[in-house]
Image (cartoon, coloured by chain):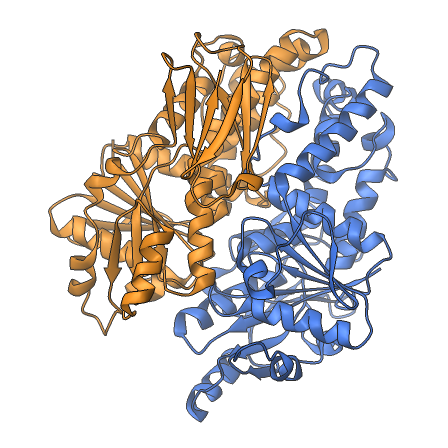
Chain colours: A blue, B orange
Amino acid sequence: MSLILTFLGKGGTGRTTVAIATAKRYASEGKRVLLVGQAPDPNLGVLLGNALTADPQEIASNLQAVQLQSAALLERSWEEVKKLEAQYLRTPILKAVFGQELGVLPGMDSALALNALREYDASGQYDVIVYDGSGDQSTLRMLGMPEVLSWYVRRFRKVFTDSDLGRTILESPFIQPLVGTVLNVSWSPDNWAQPTNQVSNILDDGRAAVTNPHRVAAYLVTTADPAAIATARYLWGSAQQIGLTVGGVILNQAMVSQAVAQTVTTEFDPLKINAFPVRTGDDWQPLVDALPDFSQADQAPRAIAVNVAERKVALFLPGFDKKQVKLSQNGPEITIEAGDQRRNISLPPELSGKPVTGAKFQDGYLIISF
Amino acid sequence: MSLILTFLGKGGTGRTTVAIATAKRYASEGKRVLLVGQAPDPNLGVLLGNALTADPQEIASNLQAVQLQSAALLERSWEEVKKLEAQYLRTPILKAVFGQELGVLPGMDSALALNALREYDASGQYDVIVYDGSGDQSTLRMLGMPEVLSWYVRRFRKVFTDSDLGRTILESPFIQPLVGTVLNVSWSPDNWAQPTNQVSNILDDGRAAVTNPHRVAAYLVTTADPAAIATARYLWGSAQQIGLTVGGVILNQAMVSQAVAQTVTTEFDPLKINAFPVRTGDDWQPLVDALPDFSQADQAPRAIAVNVAERKVALFLPGFDKKQVKLSQNGPEITIEAGDQRRNISLPPELSGKPVTGAKFQDGYLIISF
């Protein structure tokens, strides 16, 4: 298992530079590092001075780099699915569709990237994986996928198994290959029916990793530009909606006045702010030295805290005001809408199904009473 | 019908500023303008000095603005789907799933945004729609969706109707509601079976619009920074893969030397370069005045030219070198892979099914002979 680090912030604030410095630091400490970029973005390759490839290659001691290419990943998964289909079905129906023909639809980039990260993580070859993605809402959608998808699986499995039509479809060997293509799991007729199936396990493992700051943590990158600060604050709050820990703030191009530094500190309280210098030439050392201590990510506020004794749930939602947060209750779950994402929260047995008796928004926390 | 304009480029190059200036220019010319932002990005609101809403609101004379919110759009579509399901099925299976609970999965942002643009376009209320999206590969995935999805529909319809299982699934009233949720079309059992069905029409209309520079055009935004130039070149080439016309280049923060201006001109030849000044205070006029004449987008090279007499197809693929482009042929179609996207090209009857006899890469064009 690896520590997965990623950086969130407005484009142009230097996220990729920070990602490279982070990879260099861990490599210099003797950790085995994988730096992961996304194919559409030539920026990482330009800054590294290396042409990146679709499979990891060593670019320095302890440091490998890879550029995820959705078209190639999709082709690979599809051929696996066809192989499995041929095993399970006497007359496979997908054999006439060639992997090299499959176009990339919206969402596939994220699903394929998440799956690639999962496989690199599980390979045991890397101590640290630095993911230099788009650093915006797309990255959050990607990391939130196990949480959101497991809700869909949970909810729709119930809806389906309650209906004849649903059962017919779930037992068909069709839905599973499609899911298999993006999640790259082998499937069997049991996969959806059994609670301990492989898809659910992968989603549960994914959720557990994303919400554990010793496994996955994000840091905000911003300059003193108000639009960059607003974006970073928005992503900070939105990250809580998927349970992702934001460990701190990297204030780039830190030649700022005392007043500006104070503003930034206030905007991101209680996160620690690290000033990060402008890069000059090929000397990365001052940048490496300015990075935060990522092992302290667990000191940052956690997304959710449940207090059964006081019948209270506290959700950390910084960067939003009261009007931007909506709370609703349907059956045993409560739903929080903020940051253009919904979080369906399963409550512990003691609180599950109990009506909400009050909610208040205080110091960045939404506190719900039952 | 509206003219839809969007801007592609690295984050931080000023795409949103250019989008606002464009909206202001058309509004000042008496055109009815809608400026469309994406909810995760507070930047547009910060620059406009307006808090944007999920429905269009007038922010100046002739100028409306809206910020698309996926969670809200998803809820709206889902309720429509449930209504339709209840009409078609005696025992609707989705009635127990509340729209307010649906989380946003990767890809939904793009699908919902494209659908919203389609509806604003069809409303007849706007002469010009300026879309301030993420301006990167995600925007291309979104605009490429009609092209890519219509290939999936074409191909998988054939695969399915050739198999018993497939027919059962296609005739089930399940696949259609899911497609309906993101594309927001009403459906009937005929929709997929008939060649002239509503889904196909929407996809065909979408493809026709995206490839027509009088309907949809993109402009590149870059600074003189090499990473920004590399990103803009990559997006330029990638846009051709979905048939989107790139009308020109906006060179932001144009206080650059003659030498740099020359470099930029060479990198983007034959596109026209417009220098764009730095914004100072609230005076937008110098920015508005510096914008290109967007009606000239049709002067830029088109993505594909077929010459039946010479048995040649020329694909414009700027920004790539020969090694980054792959050509393959499966049955009647040829597939081009470049920019992490595949384009499946349907050939005219005279060339369809003929073997490729040669291919060369010249001056940014891939020329294929049959």
Residue B181, position in %: x, y?
Answer: 51, 31
Residue beneath the point at 53% across and 41% down: B339
Looking at the image, residue B76 sits to the left or right of residue A287; the answer is left
Looking at the image, residue B115 sits to the left or right of residue A103; the answer is left
Residue beneath the point at 21% across and 50% down: B292
Q: Quadrant of residue A59?
A: bottom right
The mark tally for this picture is 0
Residue A284, position in %: x, y?
Answer: 62, 78
Question: Can I make out residue B85 in this image?
Answer: no
Q: A170 or A30: which is nearer to us?
A: A30
Q: Quadrant of residue B9?
A: bottom left
Q: Residue furthest bottom?
A: A258
In the displayed structure, would residue A146 be above or below residue B224?
above
Question: Can I make out residue B74 in this image?
Answer: yes
Residue B98, position in %: x, y?
Answer: 58, 38
In the displayed structure, would residue B332 be above or below residue A14?
above
Looking at the image, residue B203 sits to the left or right of residue B301; the answer is right
In the displayed structure, would residue B125 be above or below residue A229?
above
Residue A157, position in %: x, y?
Answer: 74, 32
Residue beneath the point at 49% across and 84% down: A254
